[in-house]
Image (cartoon, grey):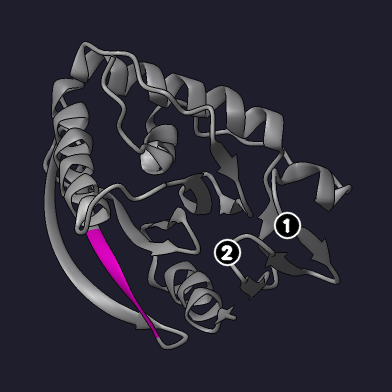
Amino acid sequence: MLYLKTSRIIVLLLFLSLIFSCKNDSNKQVDEGEIEERVYHSKDIGWTMKIPKGWEIMQRDVVQQQSDKGLEAISETLDSEIDVSQLKQLINLKKDEFHLFLSTSEKFDLTYEGEWEENNEVLKKVLYDTYTSKGIKLDTSSTNTMVSGLKFSVFKIKLYGPNGEVILYQDMYSRYINGFDFAATLNYIRPKEKDEILRAWKRSKFE
């Protein structure tokens, strides 16, 4: 069995289901952390983020159902089982079916120096191969950026429709924090919604 840290499989959700539900009881929609007065705080990650106006919290059980489909797609690509027993859904938000903010964490006990970075590079290839195996055309690039004084790896994905038009951008931010593989992914197509969620994400605070 291949044991790959896979918290970022959730980026595949958009192409498996474009409809998500919302509930009023916010704290029942996260596996870890608390939401109070539209501010989310994760104790594990030491992360605080304000939910921007007009963005709603996604229903956890619906997210989990779609995450399972994403896992199935990646397992088919690898032809191996993947252990996601320690995967946690953090705060997941939507503006509409094309504009999502998805965050996850997964326990990652390092066994050698550079292991997280190595896993991160492997995961990028797995995501690329999974998309292409489904007939989805894409371009990718990698960079680094700072969020609240911490350096994050950023994997940028541009997805194309059958006529060659761009149908979605995905920016996946990831970092090893407090023994966890932490990831936050922004799905967007319009500049206005991108700016809204990017501003909220970049104003995050990390303890």
Determine whether 118 is above or below 53 in the image. Answer: above
Which amino acid type is shown beneath numbered disc 2? Ile
Position of 69 compared to 20: left or right?
Answer: left
Task: Identify the residue position indicated by label 2 in the image.
Answer: 45
Q: Secondary structure at mark 2?
A: loop
Position of 36 compared to 154: left or right?
Answer: right
Where is residue 197 drawn, in percent x and y?
A: 52, 70
Which amino acid type is shown beneath numbered disc 1? Gly
The residue positioned 52% from the left and 44% from the top of the image is: 97
Determine whether 15 is above or below 166 in the image. Answer: above
Q: How many other residues sit within 10 Å of disc 1, few (<14), some (14-19) or many (≥20)?
A: some
Quadrant in which the N terminus appears: top left
Corner quadrant of residue 126: top left
The label on residue 33 is: 1
Label 1 to label 2, Cα distance in Å?
A: 9 Å
Q: Which portion, as a residue range, is magenta?
A: 150-155
The residue positioned 23% from the left and 58% from the top of the image is: 155
Q: Secondary structure at mark 1?
A: loop
Disc 1, disc 2: CB below 8 Å?
A: yes
Nearer to us in this view, 188 or 1: 1
Corner quadrant of residue 19: top right
Q: Is residue 138 magenta?
A: no
Where is residue 150 drawn, in percent x and y?
A: 39, 81
Q: How many other residues sit within 10 Å of disc 2, few (<14), some (14-19) or many (≥20)?
A: many
The residue positioned 29% from the left and 47% from the top of the image is: 111
Where is residue 170 drawn, in percent x and y?
A: 32, 54
Numbered marks: total:
2
Whichever of labels 1 and 2 marks the residue nearer the N terminus, that label is 1
Q: Main secondary structure of the magenta part?
A: strand
